[in-house]
Amino acid sequence: MEVLPDKRKGSNYSLSEVITGCIAMFVFKETSRNAFNQDREEQIFRDNYFRMFKKRLPHLDTVHRIISEISPQEMESIKQALIAGLIEQRIFRRFRLFDKY
């Protein structure tokens, strides 16, 4: 399901690949886009990234350029869709309080 309409014309990466690259930078606690790009150059990093996300890893300058064009309201819709997907997949079930809350 695509949450955002893709307004780009002729792109190398899908929006889901771009958004995943953006999220991965924070998940991996990279200090900067430059540091992430340096890790991206290593074959083992690219292989593990693909194994984990099943997506190609775009250059973070590309990610920044595309993300900066997305409005805050559109970013909120992405967050809502991600959380809804996690709830639907019952990812949070094991964190319930008293098996109820």
Image: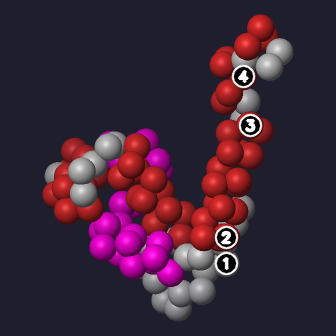
Q: Residue at x 38, y 72 (%)?
A: 64
Q: Earlier in the sequence, mark 3 or mark 4?
A: 3
Of labels 1 and 2, earlier in sequence is 1
- Left/right placement of residue 99 relative to residue 77 reads right
Q: Residue furthest right?
A: 100
**Residue at mark 1 to residue at mark 3: CA–CA distance:** 23 Å
Q: Which residue is mark 1?
A: 5
**Residue drawn at (22%, 45%), measured in percent from left and top?**
44
Q: Residue at x 51, y 71 (%)?
A: 14
Residue kind at label 1, given as amino acid type: Pro
Residue 87's mark?
Answer: 3
> Which residue sits furthest bottom?
9
Between discs 4 and 2, the one toward the N terminus: 2
Kindly identify the amino acid type of the residue bearing the numbered disc 3: Ile
Residue 48 at what x, y percent from top left? 32, 43
Q: Is residue 89 left or right of residue 11?
A: right
Q: CA distance from mark 1 to mark 4?
A: 31 Å
For label 4, the residue is: 93
